[in-house]
Amino acid sequence: MIILKAVLGSDSQRIKIRRTNRIVQNLKRDYLLYALLLLPMAYIAIFKYAPIYGVLMAFQDYNIFQGISGSEWVGLDVFQFIFQQDSFYRALKNTLILNLLDLAAGFPAPIILAILLNELRFTRFKKLTQTVLYLPHFLSWVIIGGMVYLMFSSGGMANTILSGIGLGKMEFLSDKTNWLIMYVAVGIWQSAGWGTILYLAAMIGINKDLYEAADIDGSSRLRKIWHITLPGIKPTIIILLILQIGRMVSIGFDRPFVMGNSLVSDYSDVISTYVYRIGIGSGDFSQATAVGLFQSVVGLIFLLSANYIAKKIGEQGIW
């Protein structure tokens, strides 16, 4: 028995030594690659993990002069106060509505664009079209907001043309329904072209023999798209859909802030502008942090739920 323990102990020790040697060899061989990881790891540590300490403000009556360590602890009182505010529920409702509209109208747009681009056979025209579609992604929302105002305000280009042909003016940015349509349409214009990159990359990985076999069988283009292209990019669609659902409670600040105005505040006031108003405008950092924490937790629940459902119906999830 003693001999057996000695043999097993020496074997496990040899395995540990081999594993350590292998790690050291990998570090010596690929030290430059590991060195390249230092910068992104430092970025994640400084800008992603270090700010988590600030979440404590959501459970305090935070005083900017006393700091987190000196502020009074109030437990869940901040959350109770927020959940009693009608303005919070209005911002939450608007956030969900705008994200649902973006999901319904904006999510299929890059898929359709990618399929159309993939079907183009004239290479130069295809590259030109891709470049034109990608360009809006590189524009700031401040610039886009200025362009929208110049074109669709009461005295803008669109209303000038409509008045010139006798149709009268339309309130694109002050009528609530029209504003919703403009919000979604401008969002699609800005992001759809860039979103096609992922789907076009997924289409490159589809086996070309499948298309050749479909041609031999006499399949039309629509048949090939339905039975080959869409199933080929289905895993990418599912993953991006899960990520989109995970962001249902979060929304960018710049787009609703730039495009919104006082006449449509019932629709344009979202969680990000609400946090800006109570955090930066009113200086109540505890409330702003609590709303941000609530947003993150609900977003995580949405993400995990969408991933779980995808796994249950037999699709490939994120993990």
Image (spheres, rainbow, N blue to C red):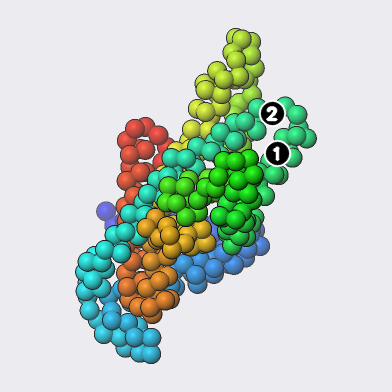
Residue 260 horizontal/vertical position (percent): 47, 59
Does residue 98 appear left or right of residue 73 in this picture?
A: right
Dots 1 and 2: beta carbons under 8 Å?
A: yes
Report crowding for label 1: few under 14, some 14 to 19, many 20 or more residues within 10 A (C-alpha): few
Kindly identify the residue that appears in the image at 46 percent across and 67 percent down. 48
Rounded to the nearest angstrom, the CA distance separating label 1 from label 2 is 10 Å
Does residue 58 appear left or right of residue 186 in this picture?
A: left
- Residue type for callout 2: Leu
Kindly identify the residue that appears in the image at 55 percent across and 48 percent down. 169
Kindly identify the residue that appears in the image at 47 percent across and 40 percent down. 105
> In the rendered image, which residue does mark 1 sit on?
129
Asked which quadrant contains residue 165, the reply is: top right
Q: Give the residue at the far front of this rendering.
A: 166
> In the rendered image, which residue does mark 2 sit on?
120
Asked which quadrant contains residue 63, the reply is: bottom left
Q: With respect to residue 23, does 235 lie above or below?
A: above
Q: Secondary structure at mark 1?
A: helix
Residue 182 horizontal/vertical position (percent): 51, 48
Q: Secondary structure at mark 2?
A: loop
- Residue type for callout 1: Thr
Q: Which of these two is toward me, 201 or 16?
A: 201
Q: Which of these two is toward me, 58 or 314?
A: 58
Q: Which of these two is toward me, 273 or 308?
A: 273
Residue 100 horizontal/vertical position (percent): 40, 45
